[in-house]
Amino acid sequence: MNKRSIAKTEKMKEMIRLKALGNSLKEISKILNLSVSSLYKYQEQLALQNIDVILEKLFISIKTNNSIFESVNSLTFSEISTISRKYKLYGISRKDKIMSIVKSIGSYVTLGMKPYEILTRSKLKTQYFKRAKEVHPDINKTIDNAVFIALHNAYENLQSQVIF
């Protein structure tokens, strides 16, 4: 690490400490002699480093909650914004961002996959057949045909996104 990156890391650590003490970004910028926009960039970098933790938290919540919307809604605004930035989802308000995330991860969840995991044709096909055995109306008479249709639509949607 060079001197510049060490100094940046130290300032990020100090920003976290001061934020935990309840200081606003404006106060922290004066203390650290940095602009507020620099602090926002640091904050965004820190959040993006934790994206895997946020997604794991979301996936566990979806499994226990069975509602994508409620699970995304239970995240903090900062976590929602981090997901939106990372995956280039759009929306200005909290509700807009939540709806774009729900729309984006719906197909993954329907197939029982973790949102935004790296897809291959074989992995997608394997997961589709595994879930199809569980929800196919000819095999499981208690499940509505609409569930299988939703599964097939999710498969078609993700299949069009797979490159290799």
Image: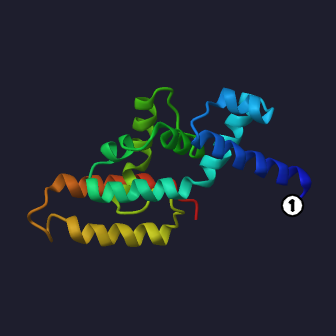
Q: Residue at x 40, y 63 (%)?
A: 113
User: Residue lying furthest front in this view?
Assistant: 21
- On the image, which quarter does residue 103 sit in? top left
Q: Which residue is drawn at 50% across and 44% down?
A: 79
Residue 124 versus residue 27: which sits nearer the camera?
Answer: 27
Q: Mark 1 points at which residue?
A: 1
**Is residue 160 visible in the rendered structure shown here?**
no
Q: How is the image coloured?
A: rainbow
* Label 1 crowd bin: few (<14), some (14–19), many (20+), radius 10 Å: few
Q: Position of residue 164 (x, y in %)?
A: 58, 65
**Is residue 39 visible in the rendered structure shown here?**
yes
Q: Which residue is drawn at 70% across and 42% down?
A: 42
Taking the image as shown, residue 145 lies to the left or right of residue 158, namely left
User: Residue lying furthest right in this view?
Assistant: 3
User: Residue lying furthest left in this view?
Assistant: 142
Residue 87 versus residue 129: which sits nearer the camera?
Answer: 87
Mark 1 lies on a secondary structure that is loop
Taking the image as shown, residue 87 lies to the left or right of residue 137, namely right
Q: Position of residue 75 (x, y in %)?
A: 42, 44
Number of numbered discs present?
Answer: 1
Q: Is residue 107 above or below residue 30?
A: below
Q: Residue at x 22, y 69 (%)?
A: 134
User: Which of the image's four quarters has the N terminus?
Assistant: bottom right
